[in-house]
Amino acid sequence: MATAELSKGGRRRRLPVGARAAWLRAYAAIWVATLGSAALVALLGAPITRTVRHLLGLRLEPDRNPPPQVGHVLALAAHNIAIAAWPLLLGVAGAHQHRLARHVADGVLLACIAVNTVLVGGALGAYGTSLLPYIPQLPLEWAALALGASSWLTHRRTALTFAEWLAAIACLLVCAAVLETGAVPHR
């Protein structure tokens, strides 16, 4: 009974028009770019795989990862929040108000997403399934990256509240950092 009373008087928050669809499109595009890069590296064969492995230099060994610590979680979250949330600043800076600024912002955002997805996709293509235990956080990180991108795509048409979008991105990335710190193989 108390629940019904609380829900009647409570105000429901609504996402801006098109925000869900923009996030879903961005999330799907990020995964397509990641998996497409992985498939390309894997299909091109040994010479490319060796080159990517050499460039990335990943050592997939549990003893290379330190035991979980709060400081590591916070460092990962801070690093990833900067990568995923910077598109929020485009709206604050007023980039949505000028056609040229919108195009430049779109290009920079696309480049940022491409760099991240091509690196991860290349690693997946080069290292294969042996990389999977080291990236359990990837769906959450990509969700936050898509949230940052979709915030800009939505802001181009509708004013957004900076704090709510930042809080959602930060929440996803703190969860991802906890997962990355605790769920990966470590010593």
Image (cartoon, grey):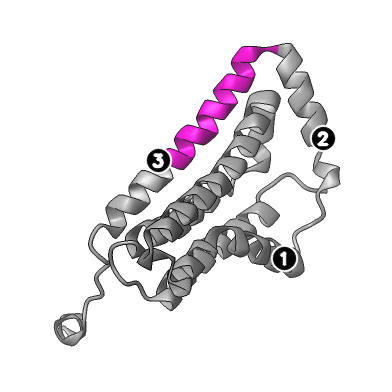
Mark 2 touches mark 1? (CB < 8 Å): no
Say if 105 sits above or below 54 in the image.
Answer: below
Q: Viewed as shown, does residue 41 lie left or right of 90?
A: right
Give how far apart the Cα atoms at labels 2 and 3 are: 28 Å
Amino acid type at circle 3 is Ala
Closer-to-camera residue (165/129): 165
Query: Where are the magenta residues, as a range?
Result: 28-45
Find out whether residue 13 is within the magenta segment: no
Residue neighbourhood size for the residue with mark 3, other residues' Cα within 10 Å, grouped as few (<14), some (14–19), many (≥20): some
Task: Please report the residue visible at 65 percent of the width from the left and 52 percent of the height from the top.
Answer: 180
Say if 87 sits above or below 6 in the image.
Answer: above
Residue 71 screen position, x and y as percent: 75, 69
Q: Mark 1 points at which residue?
A: 75
Q: Name the residue under label 2.
A: 57
Toward which corner of the image does residue 101 lie, by quadrant?
Answer: bottom left
Q: What element carries label 1?
A: helix
Say if 166 sits above or below 100 in the image.
Answer: below
Label whose residue precedes the other's in the sequence (2 or 1): 2
